[in-house]
Image (cartoon, rainbow, N blue to C red):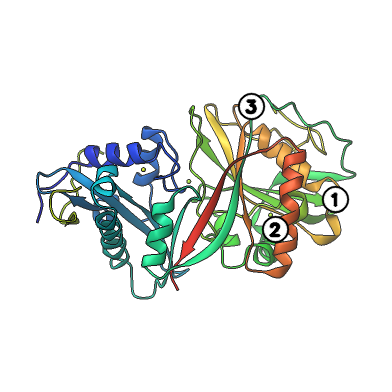
């Protein structure tokens, strides 16, 4: 068994790997402090799930960890990240080290967790090879989109008789119907989106007393870097907007592996209905200073699409962003044929609002 590695060294290794899309995991961003905070908030303690590959001299040459939801029967693999010099010395050894780390983190998951996922930029060919070597399948492409700070406020005619407000428990049946139709098998249930103990904030669009759409978002710290994407289909929300869619000194414990041969070693204020200015149910949408917005889910009922509901929900979410920035991810293609149509239509909808594509991502799933 190799010597224990300080968590600070492991986090520094991960942060270095996260600087390039060719080695990064799409569940995390590039800012070192944000990476550490995100990993500290995983559902299972990092000190228990972290696995580290080390060379004979004790140098870290590979890292991976995992998070799972037993109720969903799904896990999300962070990494594996393998040191560049491992691949430079022997690409086969690098692939083997990645496969060993993948197996090491997956074997920690409960027996009833059988659906596992990895997620990265299409530029990360190491992960593509790992998925192939592990007999995992391509789960589809996603587009990461961002509305930048300098994008002007949206100026649209008010959506008729539309109220945007915070979701309440009474809205759950309607939100559930929209959520389950557009995001089948996704990472969070409708009840979780309304759970006050979760980090989600959910807005609803109400017309003539009926809920015709909803949007769920989370706050993210503002940094100079693009924040990590949410987990694909199982941590990544498929957003359809108008169309219908996050202590001290620890050690790695015994979760260390030998690496290869031992020598080798990621709008401001209250807003009026419809577009750029929208009243949010009797008060300003809460803004957290220093935090931007990541949108997990957007869905609009079929009979309310193309009437300004999606724009109104987005404008209210934008008001909750300290810098006016919004990030989201749209999956293509989704599993449901009905959702496929709405998700494909979502891309031009967001582009027309001023969003820019920042990356193309790919998910891989165990069979």
Q: Earlier in the sequence, mark 1 or mark 3?
A: 3
Q: Which image quarter is the C terminus in?
A: bottom left
Q: Is residue 89 visible?
A: yes
For the point 37% across and 33% down, the residue is 33
In percent of the image, x 87 and y 37: which residue is there? 158
Q: Position of residue 243 (x, y in %)?
A: 77, 54
Nearest the eye: 208 or 78: 78
Q: At numbered mark 3, what does the secondary structure look like: helix, strand or loop? A: loop
How far separated are the C-alphas under marks 1 and 3? 25 Å
Which of pointers 2 and 3 lies earlier in the amino acid sequence? 3
Residue hosting label 2: 171
Compared to residue 194, the image places residue 325 above or below, namely above
Secondary structure found at label 2: helix
Query: Callout 1: few (<14), some (14-19), or many (20+) C-alpha neighbours within 10 Å?
Result: some
Q: Can you say whether 223 is above or below 300 in the image? A: above
Q: Relative to residue 278, is residue 113 drawn left or right?
A: left
Q: Earlier in the sequence, mark 1 or mark 2?
A: 2
Which residue is identified by label 1?
306
Q: CA distance from mark 1 to mark 2?
A: 22 Å
Residue 159 image position (x, y, % from top left): 87, 42
In this rendering, the label closer to the viewer, 1 or 2 = 1
Answer with the quarter of the image where residue 9 lies: top left
Which disc number belongs to residue 359? none
Question: Residue 244, position in %: x, y?
Answer: 74, 57
Residue 149's label in the rendered image is: 3
């Amino acid at each position: 068994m190799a010597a224990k590695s300080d968590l600070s060294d492991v986090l520094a290794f991960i942060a270095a790997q996260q600087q390039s899309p060719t080695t990064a995991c799409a569940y995390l961003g590039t800012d070192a402090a944000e990476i550490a905070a995100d990993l500290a908030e995983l559902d299972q303690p990092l000190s228990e799930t972290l696995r580290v590959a080390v060379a004979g001299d004790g140098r870290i040459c590979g890292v991976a960890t995992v998070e799972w939801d037993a109720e969903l029967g799904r896990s999300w693999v962070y990494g594996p990240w393998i040191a560049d010099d491992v691949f430079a010395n022997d690409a086969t050894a690098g692939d083997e080290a990645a496969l060993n780390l993948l197996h090491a983190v997956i074997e920690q998951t409960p027996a009833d967790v059988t659906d596992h996922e990895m997620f990265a930029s299409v530029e990360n060919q190491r992960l593509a090879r790992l998925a192939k070597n592990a007999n995992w399948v391509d789960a589809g492409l996603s587009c990461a989109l961002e509305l930048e700070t300098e994008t002007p406020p949206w100026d649209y005619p008010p959506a008729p008789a539309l109220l945007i407000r915070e979701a309440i428990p009474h809205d759950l049946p309607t939100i559930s119907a929209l959520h389950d139709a557009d995001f089948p098998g996704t990472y969070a249930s409708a009840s979780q989106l309304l759970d006050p103990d979760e980090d989600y904030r959910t807005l609803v669009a109400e017309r003539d007393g009926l809920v015709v759409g909803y949007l769920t978002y989370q706050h993210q710290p503002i940094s100079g870097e693009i924040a990590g994407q949410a987990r694909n289909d199982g941590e990544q929300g498929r957003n359809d907007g108008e169309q219908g869619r996050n202590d001290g000194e620890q050690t790695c414990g015994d979760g260390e592996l030998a690496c290869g041969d031992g020598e080798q070693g990621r709008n401001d204020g209250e807003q009026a209905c419809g577009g750029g200015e929208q009243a949010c149910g009797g008060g300003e949408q809460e803004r957290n200073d220093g935090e931007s917005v990541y949108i997990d889910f957007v869905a609009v009922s079929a009979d309310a699409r193309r009437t300004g509901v999606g724009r109104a929900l987005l404008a209210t979410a934008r008001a909750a962003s300290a810098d006016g920035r919004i990030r989201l991810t749209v999956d293509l293609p989704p599993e449901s044929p009905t959702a496929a149509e709405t998700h494909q239509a979502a891309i031009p909808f967001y582009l027309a609002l001023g969003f820019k594509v920042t990356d193309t991502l790919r998910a891989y799933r165990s069979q």
